[in-house]
Image (spheres, rainbow, N blue to C red):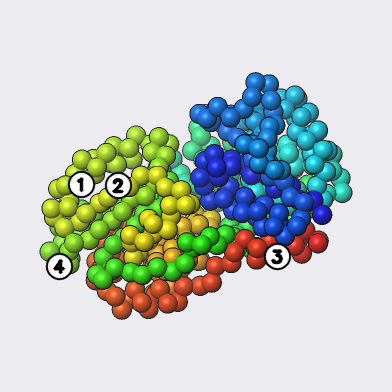
Amino acid sequence: MKILYVSFLHPAVAPGGAQQIAYEMFEAATEAKFEASFLAAIDPNNPLKLSKPGAVITGFEGRPHEYLFFPQNYKHDTFQINDERTLHFLSEFLQDIAPSVVHIHHYLFASTDLIVLCKKVLPSAKIVLHLHEMLAICMKDGQMLTSDRRLCYASSPVACHKCFPESDPDFFFIRKEMIQSAFRLVDHFVAPTNFLMNRYIDWGIDKNRITAIPNGTKRDAGFRPQGRSEQVNRFGFFGQIVDNKGLDVIFHAALSLIKDPSVRRPIVIDINGSNLRFASPRLKSIYEEYRVRRDELATAGVEINFLGEYDRAGLAARMARVDWVLVPSVWWETWALVVSEAWLFGKVPIVSNLGALSERVEHLKNGLHFDVGSSVALAQTIKSCAYNAALHEKLGSAAPQIIDNFKMLELHQPIYNF
């Protein structure tokens, strides 16, 4: 059986949860002796010079069965490619690979046109669409956050028009119809959590055509539980330095901690991440403010370390520095790979109490919740965790089992009809 995995981006080009999961499924399928290929759609505005002049699809660093796709005239709002030449070569590629299953892990950059082409060029192939986010539901980067950063519970033409007043409500009605017309050609959908699955069912996907399957994580040699510090007073943030990850909540919590005379000190907070260039001016300003104030905070007993970008190979060393993993996201999250990584390394996740985070992490059982967006609540949680070895032991010992990429592949095989 031949399987084509399609991803937005390649983890070797730009780290990220969705592309990492897609690539690890490809690796598992290859090792399981399926004839697997991997096609990574690259953002036309990607700063890396990866494409060759005139090329739509190329190989990638000589890696067997791995390809990069460079869509032209891509429309972000409707996920379409308005370029016949691009669609022609994409069609030829599908014919050359001739997969039995096309497992699409994202339609961003790859486009919904890919679904239509697959049905046209490969009429007998099974099309599986893996939903990693809510982009089809929400044009605001799939975050389901309003323009004034409030949580949004359901999309509608009028509600979406309020976030994008330059677009009429009719546009959002048509946008939904266009996306759903492509989605009707999909044989089956997969979502990593019940939360995300139910959001798409409410949006219009038939509940009989979608299954919740947890994302797996490949086990490298370094992926094993680690020890904790003697004081269990070390906290870490791991992720993109962008607004929806709630990094400002951590910074403001640090201020609350130094103002509370009952807090036991020192407390150490590591900031691991990159892509500040995608943050809003507001977050960039806050980030730089706390970099400047680092010495002031350290003198008051809260040490913030800005450790910068990390990759998968360096994750174990970064995790070894912390006891607790902070996930203060201010949007719903749909999976949060960092939660899986925390449990694999024997760390306890502290998460916002919403969406997939509150589904995956059970409060006071295998992690902790705090009120989303509340720096005061986060500060109180950090205060209760630091120097509390008994709490760390209780929560850390109850971490759920995380499936690996081979088990994830196995769970998909009934959908593939293998």
Position of 352 with respect to 155 (left or right) is left
Residue picked out by circle 3: 410
Q: 187 above or below 64?
A: below
Q: Residue at x 75, y 42 (%)?
A: 115
Q: Label 2 crowding class (10 Å Cα cut-off): few <14, some 14-19, many 20+?
A: some
Give the distance between the C-alpha atoms of the residues marked 1 and 2, in whole angstroms: 9 Å
Q: Earlier in the sequence, mark 4 or mark 3?
A: 4
Q: Label 1 crowding class (10 Å Cα cut-off): few <14, some 14-19, many 20+?
A: some
Q: Which of marks 4 and 2 is nearer the N terminus?
A: 4
Image coordinates of residue 101 in percent, x first then y, are: 78, 51
Amino acid at pointer 3: Glu
Q: Earlier in the sequence, mark 1 or mark 4?
A: 4
Amino acid at pointer 4: Ser
- In the rendered structure, find residue 169 and report the number of the disc placed on it: none
Residue picked out by circle 1: 294
Dividing the picture into quadrants, the one containing residue 405 is: bottom right
Give the distance between the C-alpha atoms of the residues marked 4 and 2, in whole angstroms: 26 Å
Any part of residue 80 in sight: no
Of circles 4 and 2, which is in front? 2
Q: Which of marks 3 and 1 is nearer the N terminus?
A: 1
Residue picked out by circle 4: 262
Give the distance between the C-alpha atoms of the residues marked 4 and 3, in whole angstroms: 51 Å
- In the rendered structure, find residue 306 and report the number of the disc placed on it: 2
Q: Which residue is drawn at 66% across and 30% down?
A: 71
Q: Which residue is drawn at 27% across and 39% down?
A: 288
Amino acid at pointer 1: Arg
Amino acid at pointer 2: Phe
Look at the image and tell me in which quarter the C terminus lies: bottom right
Look at the image and tell me in which quarter the N terminus lies: bottom right
Image coordinates of residue 329 in percent, x first then y, are: 41, 53
Q: Tally the numbered discs.
A: 4
